Image (cartoon, helix red, strand yellow):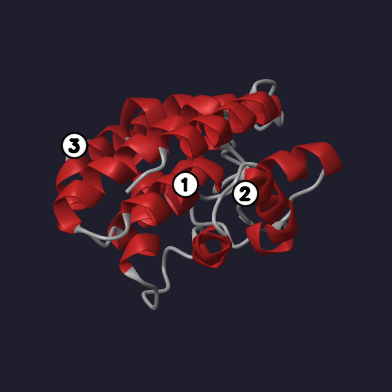
Amino acid sequence: MLSLPVLKKLTKEIYKLFKEENTGHDFSHLKRVMQNAIYIQKREGGDLYIIAISALVHDIHRLVSNQKGYFVRAEDCLDVVEKILKDCGIEEDKIKEILYIVENHERKREKIFNLETYIVQDADILDALGKIGLKRCLKYCKTHKIPVSNTKYPLNSPEYIPDINPISSCHYIYNTIIPNADFLYTETAKKMAKGKVKMLENFVKHNYK
């Protein structure tokens, strides 16, 4: 069961940390991922407590990346996440499981995890699809001065590297966001994704010019 006082305290802390974030990995994103994850959990099972809290803290590494000025991987920020969890009163026996999900939430193409990790991964993928996902992508690219389109490189350019050399919004959508939808694990998430991918494909088609 979710401990409401603990969740409330953690939510307040995460909001405070992310209120100035403007790359598309803001508090609204974290809240939507948590809501998606809870929706999936009700239909697929898994530990609700672990899933909800992991979804809420999964992008701490993005905050650290903004502070440092370069991309920092999730696995390199686990100490930061652990401190936040402890300060907010999360039980010691739960923290290890939460850190495992945070560490692996971006490894969406490796099907070697537990159900809780899959659900958070699926919830995160879903928030990158459709109208909301497109808005987040364009916001992220604008913040990092990444153009919407760059026809100097083919869409499948080997020089494309997500978070390091995304080239353009179209390249990021084509090479990362759309393919990630193929790695949705739960049937619930797959149903939720219907139609969202087509919208992104149409965006790339009309804007890669």
In this rendering, the count of numbered labels is 3
82 or 164: nearer the eye? 82
Q: Which residue is mark 2?
A: 85
- Image location of residue 172, percent across then percent down: 52, 44
Answer few, some or many: residues within 10 Å of disc 2's Cα (few below 14, many 20 plus, some between 14 and 19): many
Q: Are marks 1 and 2 in contact (CB under 8 Å)?
A: yes
Secondary structure category for the residue under label 3: loop
Dot 3: within a 10 Å radius of its alpha carbon, few (fewer than 14), some, or many (20 or more) residues?
few
Occupied quadrant, residue 192:
top left
Nearer to me, 24 or 96:
96
* Left or right of 137 on screen, residue 133: left
Which three-letter amino acid code belongs to the residue tagged 3? Gly
Picture coordinates of residue 88, whole percent (x, y)? 62, 41
Residue on which disc 1 sits: 53
Disc 3 marks which residue? 195
Q: Nearer the viewer, mark 3 or mark 2?
A: 2
**SS for dot 2:** helix
Q: Which mark is residue 176?
A: none
Task: Say which amino acid is labelled 2.
Answer: Leu
Alpha carbon of mark 3 to alpha carbon of mark 1: how far?
A: 28 Å
Tell me the CA gap for discs 1 and 2: 9 Å
